[in-house]
């Protein structure tokens, strides 16, 4: 982009600002002046360089903001995924109805049970027993899901697809 084109676009942008800063106001005055002395020309060139630097800095801040927002979105997505998996565990345990999402027992009772479990000083043997039972249930559900997925894939592959002409 040529300097004249950039300057004309930037001047139009500055004119549209509600409150341009002192540098921008001086740049407008000098740019709109017909003929410039050597000193005024030097000042205008310095102001143009400063305005270009400010524009680059603004773009850099916007780029950083986009990167930070993308990172936050990824973290939020990972957190949401963990929460959905936790809800899935409650469904697998039979504590939440699959179709409605409503707990199968009173909410206060369920919360009290979970708080008691979290605060319980449970022996390692009992925890190992719970883990084995959970592993077996997860393996069973995983096998059922895999079987359903395999059947669906076979069905999709067996369907006749229209040919493109």
Image (tube, grey):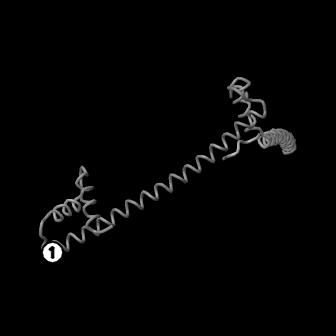
Looking at the figure, which quarter contains the N terminus?
bottom left
Image quadrant of residue 24? bottom left
| Most distant residue in the front direction | 165
Give left or right: position of 42 versus 141.
Answer: left
Residue name at image x 75 percent, y 29 percent: 95
Q: Is residue 115 above or below residue 109?
A: below
In this rendered view, identify the residue nearer to me: 78 or 107: 78
Q: Position of residue 133 (x, y in %)?
A: 86, 39
| Number of marks in the rendered image | 1
Near-viewer residue (34 or 68): 34
Question: Looking at the picture, how far across and down is residue 69, in whole percent?
Answer: 50, 52
Q: Position of residue 108 (x, y in %)?
A: 68, 26
Most foreground residue, 111 or 30? 30
Work out whether residue 154 or residue 80 is closer to the camera in this orientation and state it. Answer: 154
Residue 146 picture location, percent across and down: 81, 42
Asked if residue 93 shows in the view, the reply is yes
Residue located 24% across and 56% down the image: 12
84 vs 126, left or right, is left
Can residue 121 be seen? no
Write down the residue under mark 1. 39
Question: Badge 1 local density, few (<14 within 10 Å), some, or many (20+)?
Answer: few
Element type where label 1 sits in the image: helix
Reply above or below: 58 against 35: above
């Amino acid at each position: 982009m040529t300097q004249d084109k950039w300057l004309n676009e930037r001047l139009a942008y500055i004119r549209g600002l509600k409150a341009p800063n002192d540098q921008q106001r001086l740049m407008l005055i000098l740019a709109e002046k017909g003929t410039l002395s050597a000193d005024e020309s030097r000042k205008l060139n310095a102001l143009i360089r400063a305005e270009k630097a400010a524009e680059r800095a603004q773009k850099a801040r916007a780029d950083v903001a986009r990167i930070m927002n993308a990172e936050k979105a990824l973290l939020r997505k990972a957190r949401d995924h963990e929460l959905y998996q936790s809800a899935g565990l409650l469904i697998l345990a039979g504590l939440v109805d699959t179709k409605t999402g409503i707990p199968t027992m009173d909410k206060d009772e369920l919360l009290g049970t979970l708080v008691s479990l979290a605060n319980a000083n449970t022996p390692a043997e009992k925890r190992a027993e719970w883990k084995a039972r959970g592993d077996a249930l997860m393996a069973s559900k995983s096998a059922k899901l895999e079987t359903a997925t395999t059947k669906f894939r076979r069905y999709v592959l067996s369907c006749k697809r229209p040919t493109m002409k």
